[in-house]
Amino acid sequence: MKKALLVISFGTSYPQALQKNIAASEQALANAFPDRDFFRAFTSSMIINKLSQRDGIDIAHPREALAALKRAGYRDVLIQSLHIINGDEYEKIVREVAHCRHQFERIEVGVPLLSDCDDYQRLIDAIEYQSPPLAADERLVLMGHGTTHHAFSAYACLDHMMQTHQRPFIVGAVESYPGIETVISRLQQAQVRKVYLMPLMLVAGDHAIHDMASDDPDSWKVLIEQAGITAEPIVQGLGENPLIRQLFIDHLTAVSSSDMASQQAGAASQTSQTIQPSVMTSMHVKEPVA
């Protein structure tokens, strides 16, 4: 039976961020599940359209990818979401899988990064691994995307756990709570002299470059500096962090069979193999790549 691994992310239009974060995560997952053919899909139609028009690159939407897998004869499909929270983008994947589940003998979906209590602790440890050394009057400020979905509470939960564990990290969100005003107020109360800014996102894309690190008047860097605090951006996505990539692997392993888990463990002890170009190519809705 033909078996596929479909890795689905929001996507990015920044080529370097794509390679360092999305492709790196995809490669780690492909190495962990070597008996499956690898495919990619994005949930952002805006990014899919931009890549097609600007670069002539065709990336499948989840529905297109699943339809192409069915036509190509795949009956066993493992899907891993590279999303951070269980929000709107992840729910797109769940809806598409529910729509076509009857067309496959087996189809399973690995959950996003923050899906249970242990995930939060592992993310905090991964951030500590990625953080620069911090003096007593310094903090690492993490910029999350934010959402109108009720899953926005994940950001405040993560921030609360960081405080509970006395980590010098503060979480904010561009489009929901905690906002930059809350972040700056806390920095001032703690008499912080300097902060490092890092995206709490898989990729360091548009939000990281413009909303976080730029000299635009409403960027987090500028707003924090206007408050009298030195701000140094770290334009680096979570996908560059090997501990984050391992967390995604563990999420997919959790929904795979025990024999698949054994294969993953064995693959981890072997030399990593690079995904072949014919497999790494994005799936086209009319010409699926086998």
Image: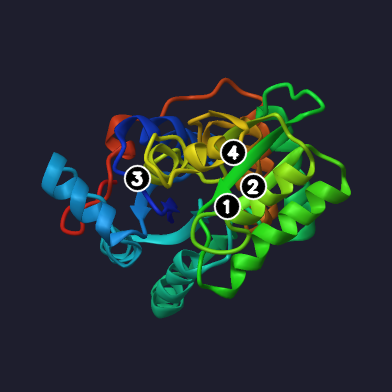
| Image marks 3 and 4: residues in contact by CB distance under 8 Å | no
Q: Is residue 193 left or right of residue 267?
A: right
Viewer-closest of 165 and 272: 165
Label of residue 180 in the image: 1
| Image marks 4 and 1: residues in contact by CB distance under 8 Å | no
- Mark 2 burial class by Cα count in 10 Å: few <14, some 14-19, many 20+: many
68 shown above or below 101: above
Which residue is identified by label 3?
A: 12
Which amino acid, by three-letter code, is at mark 4?
Arg
N-terminal of the pair, mark 3 or mark 2, is 3
N-terminal of the pair, mark 2 or mark 4, is 2
State the CA–CA distance, disc 3 to disc 2.
28 Å
Which residue is identified by label 4?
A: 245
State the CA–CA distance, disc 3 to disc 4.
17 Å
Give the residue drawn at x 79%, y 56%.
Answer: 160
Give the residue drawn at x 61%, y 52%.
Answer: 172
N-terminal of the pair, mark 3 or mark 4, is 3
Which residue is identified by label 2?
A: 184
Which amino acid, by three-letter code, is at mark 2?
Ile
Circle 2: element type: helix
Q: Colour mode?
A: rainbow
Which numbered mark, 3 or 1, is in the foreground of this view? 1
Circle 4: element type: helix
Q: Can residue 218 be seen here?
A: yes
- Dividing the image into 4 quarters, which one contains the N terminus? bottom left
